[in-house]
Image: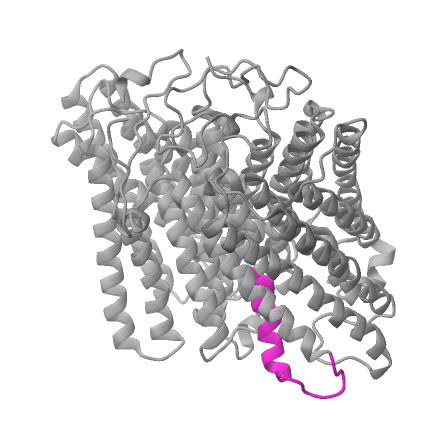
Amino acid sequence: MTTAQPTGFKSWLFTTDHKKIGIMYLVTSLVFFVVGLLLAFVMRTEQLDITKKVIIDADLYSTAFTIHGAAMVLFWMIPVLTGFFANYMIPLMIGAHDVAFPRLNALSYWLYVMAGLIAVMALILPGRLDTGWTGYPPYSIVGPSNTAFYVFAVHLLGASSIAGAVNFITTIITLRAPGMKWGRLNLTVWGLFGGFIIQLVGVPVLAAAVTLLLFDKYLGTSFYDGTKGGSPILYEHLFWFYAHPAVYVVALPVFGIVSDIISTFARKKVYGYTSMAIAIMIITVVGFETWVHHLYVAGTLNWTRVVFMWGTIAIGVPTGIKTFNWLATLHKGSIELTTPMLHALGFISLFTIGGVTGIANGLLGLDIQIHDTQWVVAHFHYVLAISMSMLCMGGIYYWFPKFTGKMYNEKLGKIAFWITLIGAMIAFLPQHTLGLDGIPRRYWKLPAKYAPEMRIAVIFSYITIAGFLMTLYNFVHSAIKGEKAPANPWNSKSLEWQIPSPPPFYNFEKIPTITEGPYEYGKPAEEPAKSH
Amino acid sequence: MEDVMHGGNHEVHHHVVELSVWPLITAIGAFMIPISFMTAFSWGLSSIGIVLAGVAIVVLIVGLFGWLNEVHAKKEDAGLSKIAIIVFIVSEVALFGGLFGGYLYAMLFTDIWPPVNTPAGVPPIGLAVLMTIFLLSSSFTMHNAEEKLTHGDMGGFKSWLTFTTILGTLFIAFMAYEWHHLISGNFTVRTNEYGTFFYTITGFHGSHVIVGLVMQVFLMILASGNKIGKGRQTMAKVTGLYWHFVDIIWLLVMSLIYIVPSIKAGQ
């Protein structure tokens, strides 16, 4: 390599290097994660006393849950996976110098930052957004909040996501190294590939849905206005057509990362690799046959409710395949309980609890009772919010030596993990009972008889938040003061570990020729995996 | 780089770009558009909003133009954009799928379609037939242009491309006339659900035609500067694929927005 690596702040501001863009995605998304945590802290503190105001009034509470949801889903989880992990790992895992369109990649990142600025404005400027992250009409059209914040944040983020999806799908199709067959891709790459397909098909529909919201508000159109012949239900259809599959945009890459971590630390080939990849693609498709379960009580045709109930339950099958395959991979493995491995196992436990309550949600009859209640809040915090945030932390730990060139603090990592897990296991447990009693979500204050349950929820949510903050401290501290990491501290067979830590500017001196898959354990360790 | 980029058929000659100012500038332009909109509409400062919008558009154009210039300053043509445009068209299909889905939803859940207060003569089917002819024939001329390029006939390529651009421009001109005609005939977005969807879907489609025309103009500039040719035709292929896609979407617009309501109104 003749070219020197650019340095200085310009080398970040104008960079088109996938590794630097990845790091910028990581830092930015972690900032939004902290914003989301702070809002969660404020909201839970408000429920310490469920009879009178503690910190914020009811209006500000509505803004708090709106921005909490948007920050956590749209600005933390989706970007950390499709931004950081995709950027940093895909070129290394498929054996490429960079992504297909490096400039477009930089544009994706900057559009995400710009969308984030609008989200922050929505939190502090007049006309604060308080519609919930769903932005349902008619309230979003006739209510006092400035829906334009919401619409434009979605537009910029949507442009970022579509550009990212086009870029990475093209990268995975065209830039795989010689010998890198589809059957030799890391499951992380498979998961991200599925996630990007969902982004590609879903995001434009969301963009259309919110554009029509803007037209209704400012141009006097009547898409969602029932008084003029429109229908607010139409918005719910268009919104959830994307927003339900959006959870699979998070889940599929997470499933991939779990598989990579478990295989490495059980020193075993992923059990049923092909069925894992197929399950990812099935979820990608069937994910679009579930959205009507968000409208069971909103008013849709009866037969659609039944069809989508079966779609919703059917998605449990490929998900179950994955869970059992992880267990089978662990079976008789040589398990090493490192921090990333603990996070992967913690994820499986939390995810299974949330997955089971998800089947309950999907049942039409039962959902009529628990729809829009605290039960649903409990469900998605187990299945998505906390479990998958935890796994993202596990993924960051796993590749920390690779992308920083430093080792993280193992002891602190394990302590932080156990604190987070203990908090997460109980923080949303009481919400199940509240939900079965019919207590709605998004309420500022609750009936006094639920004070004991809420106290448990508040205390354990504090514990969860403390655990996550310790993890973040570990990242920052280790990135600065950690010991120097070897190229392959885990003795992984996967391609990204066969190059130095951190990787050189061009990733690979020579594009490698791939001769086997990423999980070929059980062969002599000294045999070089895939250089030639 | 060339010496290390050896290998089999899978190898793509891929050069790592190090620094580029254009993505950030483009993103700033994109950020200023919503800010200008909100300044004008949400915060009631119309004049500042209009100035901001002007600045935003200039920044956006500078960003995109600088970007494309940088891309085409290079000699080689990796050809990855052909895959990328197909992937991108999938997302465009989803966008129109969402809009048409909404339209069908409104149509199926409304007793009389178009609703009773739709003025007579709406939709104007005669005009739409003329516009269909323009757009369909422009797809053929675009195809001819690509054929000429494949055979290295730059003169033929430029002529057929010019025909395409003229036909596309005629389409937009007739669309503008149609909108003007309908609005003065008291058929607006506020008339009813049909008006709301009519202008939104034809407007979305029209804006895509305009993007296609801008791509053609850019292609013409590249052709005049000898920056495309027999070995470097990715940009032409990309423009062609996008143009055919816009054409196919028009057939759906024509069927669902013009023909179906005409038949239903005639019942």
- Residue at the limit of the structure toward the left, as seen here: B225
Which quarter of the figure is the N terminus of chain A placed in? top left
Residue at (68% x, 87% y) in the render: A53
At a point 62% along the width and 85% down the height, the residue shown is A57
In the depicted structure, whether residue B106 falls above or below residue A487 = below
Q: Position of residue B12 (x, y in %)?
A: 36, 20
Where residue A113 appears, x then y in whole percent? 41, 57
Q: Residue at x 52, y 61 (%)?
A: A32
Q: Is residue A520 left or right of residue A361?
A: left
List x then y, in percent, for residue A409.
Answer: 58, 48
Depicted A43 relative to depicted B149: above or below: below
Instruction: Describe residue A365's horizontal placement relative to residue A207 as left or right.
Output: right
Q: Is residue B15 left or right of residue A447?
A: left
Q: Is residue A300 shown to the viewer in this render?
A: no
Tell me the magenta residue range.
A48-71
The answer to if A509 sits in the magenta stretch is no
- Determine the image quadrant of residue B116: bottom right
The one of B32 and B196 positioned closer to us in this rendering = B32
Residue beneath the point at 27% across and 41% down: A6
Q: How many numbered callouts? A: 0
Looking at this view, is B44 or A318 the one in front?
A318
Q: Nearer the viewer, residue B170 or A428?
A: A428
Colour scheme employed for the rendering of this structure: one colour
Measured as percent of width and height from the top left, residue B172 is found at 29, 48
Judge whether residue A64 is colored magenta: yes
* Any part of residue A382 in sight: yes
Closest to the observer: A262 or A106? A262
